[in-house]
Image (cartoon, helix red, strand yellow):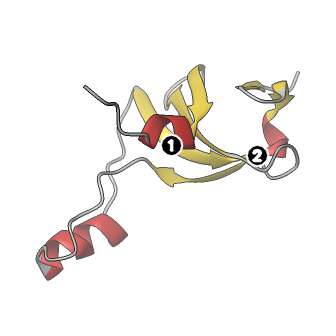
Amino acid sequence: MASLVPCPHCGPRPKEEFTIKGAVLQRPAPGDSAQAWFDYVYLRDNPRGSYEEYWHHTSGCRRWLVVTRNTATHEIHACEDAADKTKVKSA
């Protein structure tokens, strides 16, 4: 049985409709050191457990999503629109 991803726009969809694009990382500031930018672009952790990744719903709504999944079991714990996740919350 195929794994289903709970797309917030399309509902549960087969994982084959999605393209995994990489870890959700804090982007360095424009004036940060070359080493900070090198680490951001080229170095990745390989954690065991819960991890946030950017996924693109390529064969569906074409939205960018943040998927939280367990890297050991591949179980998906959460899926939200990347635009909603990056909005600044007002005080």
User: What residue appears at the point 43 percent right and 40 percent down from the top-left corner?
Assistant: 87
- Note whether 14 is above or below 73 in the view shown: below
Taking depth in this image into account, of 21 and 91 the one nearest to the observer is: 91
Say which amino acid is labelled 1.
Glu
- Where residue 59 sits in the image (x, y, percent)? 88, 49
> Of 64 and 22, which appears nearest the observer?
64
Q: Nearer the viewer, mark 1 or mark 2?
A: 2
Horizontal placement of 46 versus 67: left or right?
left
Say which residue appears at 29% left-offset and 52% top-offset. 26
Depth check: give the residue in front, 19 or 9.
9
Q: Nearer the viewer, residue 27 or 45?
A: 27
Figure check: 2 above or below 25: above
The quarter in which the N terminus is drawn is top right
Identity of the residue furthest to the left in this view: 33
Residue 8: image quadrant is top right
Q: Secondary structure at mark 1?
A: strand
Drawn side of residue 30 relative to residue 51, left or right? left
Q: Amino acid at mark 2?
A: His
> Which percent across, then down, holds residue 60?
87, 44
**Quadrant of res 35:** bottom left
Q: Secondary structure at mark 2?
A: loop
Say which residue label 1 marks.
53
The residue singled out by tag 2 in the image is 57
Alpha carbon of mark 1 to alpha carbon of mark 2: how far?
Answer: 13 Å
Q: Quadrant of residue 12?
A: top right
Q: Residue furthest bottom?
A: 34
